[in-house]
Amino acid sequence: MRQTIEGGKTLLVDGPACISLYSGALRAFGAPIKVGDHIIIRRGRRIPLEALEDSEIELLLGNSASYSLIDEDPIPASWKEAAGKIVRVGGCVKVAVLGNVDSGKTSFCTYLANVALGAGRNVALIDGDLGQSDVGPPGTLGLSFVRKPLVDPFNLQPSSIVFVGITSPSSVIEPTINGLVELVSRALVAGSDFIVVNTDGWVEGLDAVNYKLRLIKSLQPNFVVAIQDKDELKPLVDLLTGLGISIVNIETPRNIKRRDRETRKLIRESSYRRFLRDAKVRSYPLSWVKVDGCLGIRGKQDQILRKRMDEVLGDRVVYCESCQDSIILVLREGATLSDEERAKILAELNKPLRIIHRGDEKGLLVALEDEKGCFLGIGTINCVDFERGTIKIYTNVDGPISRIRVGQIRLDERGNEIEVVGGLGMFFR
Ligand SMILES: Nc1ncnc2c1ncn2[C@@H]1O[C@H](COP(=O)(O)OP(=O)(O)O)[C@@H](O)[C@H]1O
Ligand SMILES: [Mg+2]
């Protein structure tokens, strides 16, 4: 569909949609869009296209997409002032962006990156939002270098990814903070002098405030940008101000598009699918790769223990391994132990017993890493073949791997989220 946008007006497009510019000139979050450019607008995302002059576009709308024309500048004055102030500072600048879910964090990071790029800075974007990640798949932290103006960081090529394995930060505060500190240092090593760190939207409540405080203390940014509508960041901002950190307060744009839980889930699922494109099931011998995280297993059956388990439990036993701090006992699907049987086994063990059922591992999201610990891609566990000592992973990583990190998100075969698992199996001691 052809659409004309009068100079000075803004077209708000809600994806999934695709636009091509035929004539005129547009701008989105500070990124110029030139004649001939094509812009993909993801589902769940709204892009404000400012017409710098009378412009003509071809607009392709997907299912549930929509658009509207508004007569106002979509970029709030506070955003422009904030970006101007931060970019004026010379030397190496680190900025952390804080805000609630759907407050405009990703969009402000995009806008700030574009302004800094325009000022000739060497810009790195670090994505610290595990749930609504922009750079890597959900459950990961990402680093990307911004070499040209961007409309949506989703289109950036990730340079480095740290796998955390869950989409909410509350149980993984330490790994998230460490991961972000590591990505900042990688950006510095690569020569970036303008580092923008986006964060997750968990900002309310004591635990969230403490976490963000720790994060900011660890990152040591020159500026913290606080995006808020009302006063939702006040407790955090007050504490940060007390620490002498430079806070830049900005507002949430009037035309922001809020997403419900279901839409956020759909966005995550399309991201898993994107990072699993062209995947197939690959088999890795457990003796070649280190498997850790939610499921730590070496694939070396303890024969003496196995014999004893067989004596007590018969054909319910699939596998038995003695790990550093527990004994893993894998049972057939649906098999149970009576209290007496369990007590009998426990009395003979000098470590806690971890009981897993065959198939419990199916669908868990994993990260595959090379021998240097670099992230190669994600996958999902198809199965562990305990008899053969192999693990089958659905992934598009095709080179050699050294480590499989098992996360806590379970996906089905189509990449839909089924559940988050606390840990695999049950511990008895
Ligand atoms: N100034 C704006 N005008 C119109 N839509 C906007 C504007 N800023 C952000 N949006 C849209 O609102 C939605 C939420 O913003 P986003 O930056 O993704 O928030 P967050 O990262 O805090 O969840 C996105 O679809 C985004 O493109
Ligand atoms: Mg975001």
Image (cartoon, grey):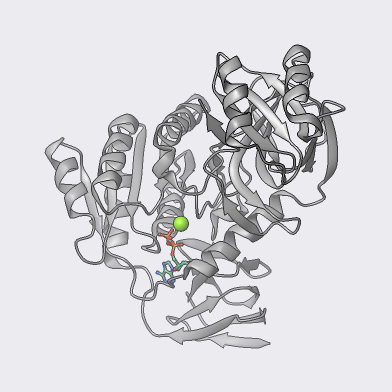
Say if 213 sits above or below 56 in the image.
above
- Taking depth in this image into account, of 48 and 360 the one nearest to the observer is 360
The quadrant in which the N terminus is found is bottom right
| Residue 363 screen position, x and y as percent | 70, 47
Picture quadrant of residue 37: bottom right
Q: Looking at the image, which residue sits at the far left?
A: 242
Say if 125 sits above or below 186 in the image.
below
Instruction: Answer whether residue 371 is visible to the viewer in this image.
Output: no
Instruction: Answer whether residue 36 is visible to the viewer in this image.
Output: yes
- Which residue is located at x 16 percent, y 42 percent? 239
| Residue 246 screen position, x and y as percent | 20, 42
Picture quadrant of residue 399: top right
- Taking depth in this image into account, of 246 and 167 the one nearest to the observer is 167
- Which residue is located at x 68 percent, y 28 percent? 329
- Which residue is located at x 65 percent, y 60 percent? 270
Q: Is residue 266 left or right of residue 180?
A: right
Picture quadrant of residue 18: bottom right
- Which residue is located at x 57 percent, y 22 percent? 346
Q: Is residue 230 left or right of residue 75?
A: left
| Residue 41 screen position, x and y as percent | 60, 68
Which quadrant contains ligand 1? bottom left
